[in-house]
Amino acid sequence: MAAPSGDEELPAGALPPGDIHRGEPPLGALPLGAPEAKAASSRGALGAEPAAGVLYLVGTPIGNLADLSPRARLVLEQVDRIACEDTRHSGQLLARLGIRRPLLSFHQHNQATRLPELLEALQRGERLAVISDAGLPGISDPGEPLVAAARQAGLEVVCIPGPCAVTTALVSSGLPSGRFCFEGFLAAKPSQRRRQLQELAAEPRTLVLFEAPHRLIALLEDLLELLGDRPLRVARELTKRHEQQVGPTVAAALEHFRRVPPLGECTLVLGGAPPAAQPAWNEAALRAELEALLGGGLSKREAARNLAERTGHSRRDLYALLHHDSASGDHEGSSHA
C-alpha cells in the first residue's frame, strides 16, 4: 500500500506512516515518555513494521480492550489487509479499537480456497495480518495451517505477542505451571471425548482444555468419572469485569455449574495424574512367585511378564531378579530359557 501524501486523507483510526520506513514510530505509537525506537532493519522494532511480504500473527484482547499492545495496534492499523475467522465479530472489535482496515474471512470452511490466495498475496509483497476471534491466532483456529504453508513457501512469519487464554488461566489457577499439556477442545461426540480422556488419564502434567458452555457439564461429569476428583479451575470471562474461576475440584465445579448454567467459552485447568503408588518389593515373596511360574512351564520372560502384570512391578526388574538367582546358582540344570 503506497504511503499517502500529506494532503491526502488517512483512513479513520490509521496513524501517519511517514516515519515508518526510517525506523521511527509514528506519533502516538509509543506511551508518553517511552524512548525512541531505533530499527536496525526493516522489522523488529516498534514503528519499523509492517514490512512487505510478511505474515503477521497479531494477538488481540481476550476480553479487556486495554490489553491490545501498542505494537499490535500499529501493525493492524497499517497492514494492507486483515484475515480473520468472522468478519462481523472482528469488524466490531476493530471498530471499538478505532482500527479500520479491509477484512477478509479465513476459517475452516473456506481455508482450502482462501489459503492459496493469501500465500499469493504475500508473495506479491502484500502486508497481511491474521487475527483470531480472541487471543493469539494459530491456537485452535485456522491460523495454524496458514503459518505452516507460509513457512513451507519460504515466507517470513512474525508473531506480535498478545493475550492468550491458555497461559492466563494457567498461571492464575494455582496449579503447577512449570510443565503443562494443552489439549484445546475435546471431541463433541461423547464416546470420542471419553476415549480421549481415557488416553489422558495417566498424564502427570497439568492439563488445559477449552470447552463450549453447552458441553461443559457433560465434560465435567466425564472428568469426575474417568479421571477422578482432581484439582480444577474453570475460568470464564477472563480479563473482563466479571472474570470467574470456579473450583477447587472437579466435583465442586460440577456442583456449581449444575446450579448456575455457564455462559461463554470456558478454559479448564486440571491437575495432572497423581504419582502411582509403588507396590512393596518383597524379594522373598516375588522369588517364590517366580519359582512357581517357572515350575508351571513358563519361560523366564513369560514368568516376569505374568508377575509384572499382576503386581505392578517392572517386568525388567523381575527378569533381572531371575538372572541374579541364576548367577547365584539357582535353577542349575533347569530347561527353562
Image (cartoon, rainbow, N blue to C red):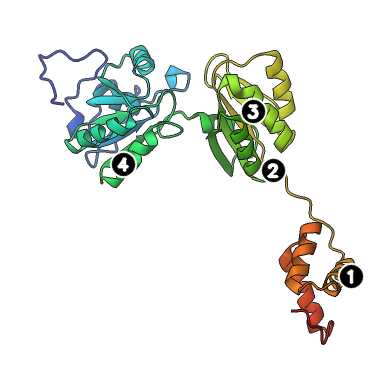
Precedes in sequence: disc 2 or disc 1: 2
**Disc 2: which residue:** 273
Residue 149 image label: 4
Labels 3 and 2 touching (C-beta < 8 A): no
The residues bearing labels 2 and 4 have C-alpha atoms spaced at a distance of 36 Å
**Label 4 crowd (10 A; few <14 / some 14-19 / many >=20):** some
Q: Secondary structure at mark 4?
A: helix
Precedes in sequence: disc 2 or disc 4: 4
**Label 3 crowd (10 A; few <14 / some 14-19 / many >=20):** many
Residue 210: quadrant of the picture? top right
Mark toward the viewer: 2 or 1? 1
User: Can you see residue 208?
Assistant: yes
Residue 144: quadrant of the picture? top left
Front one among 93 and 84:
84
Residue 170 location (% of width, % of height): 58, 33
Q: Does 12 sit above or below residue 288?
A: above
Residue 219 image label: 3
Amino acid type shown at disc 2? Ala
**Disc 1: which residue:** 288
Amino acid type shown at disc 3? Leu
The residues bearing labels 1 and 4 have C-alpha atoms spaced at a distance of 61 Å
Residue 136 horizontal side relative to residue 13, left or right: right
Q: Secondary structure at mark 1?
A: helix
